Image: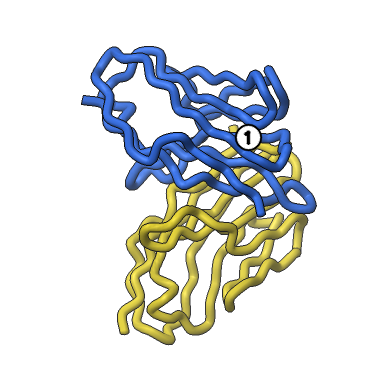
Chain colours: A blue, B yellow
Amino acid sequence: DVKVTQSSRYLVKRTGEKVFLECVQDMDHENMFWYRQDPGLGLRLIYFSYDVKMKEKGDIPEGYSVSREKKERFSLILESASTNQTSMYLCATLTGQALEKLFFGSGTQLSVL
Amino acid sequence: GDSVTQMEGPVTLSEEAFLTINCTYTATGYPSLFWYVQYPGEGLQLLLKATKADDKGSNKGFEATYRKETTSFHLEKGSVQVSDSAVYFCALNRDDKIIFGKGTRLHILP
């Protein structure tokens, strides 16, 4: 079974802090994604990566950056956290016979105070 | 850019009622289409999919047909159960970029 592990389930940070959210997958998948989920807004794509050191902006990349130094690890970085970045962050990898199925980690609920 | 629009919720139905959740998309080319479901307290999971026009995806009594002419992928179920209460997300995949709609919360009353 695919396993996508996000390093923290809950995280509390202060405004202006640099925040790292880590995601590790164990299936050698090439495509990995970061979303944020907010009530009434659904899931919004922040960044995705289709290979090591490759990254693509999603729909809301402002205020975020990513790092993919190894295939299994995809990190989301908040350079200077702000209160409007309080959200549930979901990491996912693309799996399935035709790469049609997203498999999600359990999520990190980030609160920025 | 690519986008997915689905009907706003919450949708409240009685058990055994017929369900339709509308979903339309905007995309160039021929994306694959999906419905994901998020049960209370759980992560998102794939419910069904369709990869080309006129395909019908089905799972757990739910169905959706890929309609290219109307750019739609409406979710239907003939008789809903209380256990179907969840948030449903329509999504598309074009060139491995997955875009989600805002989600529709469904409440089923016993």
Can you identify the residue that label 1 sits on? Answer: A32
Quarter of the C terminus of chain A within the rendering: top left
Quarter of the N terminus of chain A within the rendering: bottom right
The residue at the point 72 percent across, 26 percent down is A51
Front residue of this view, candidates A103 and B71: A103
Front residue of this view, candidates A42 and A89: A89
Residue A9 locus on image (x, y percent): 38, 41
Q: In this view, does A7 lie to the left or right of B51?
A: left
Q: Which chain carries label 1?
A: A
Place residue A55 in its image quadrant.
top right
Place residue B15 in its image quadrant.
bottom left
The residue at the point 62 percent across, 67 percent down is B64
Q: Residue furthest left?
A: A113
Front residue of this view, candidates B78 and A75: A75
The residue at the point 72 percent across, 34 percent down is A30
Residue B55 locus on image (x, y percent): 75, 64
Q: Is residue A35 left or right of residue B40?
A: right
- The amino acid on which the numbered mark 1 sits, given as a three-letter code, is Met
Front residue of this view, candidates A112 and B97: A112
Figure check: B95 above or below A57:
below
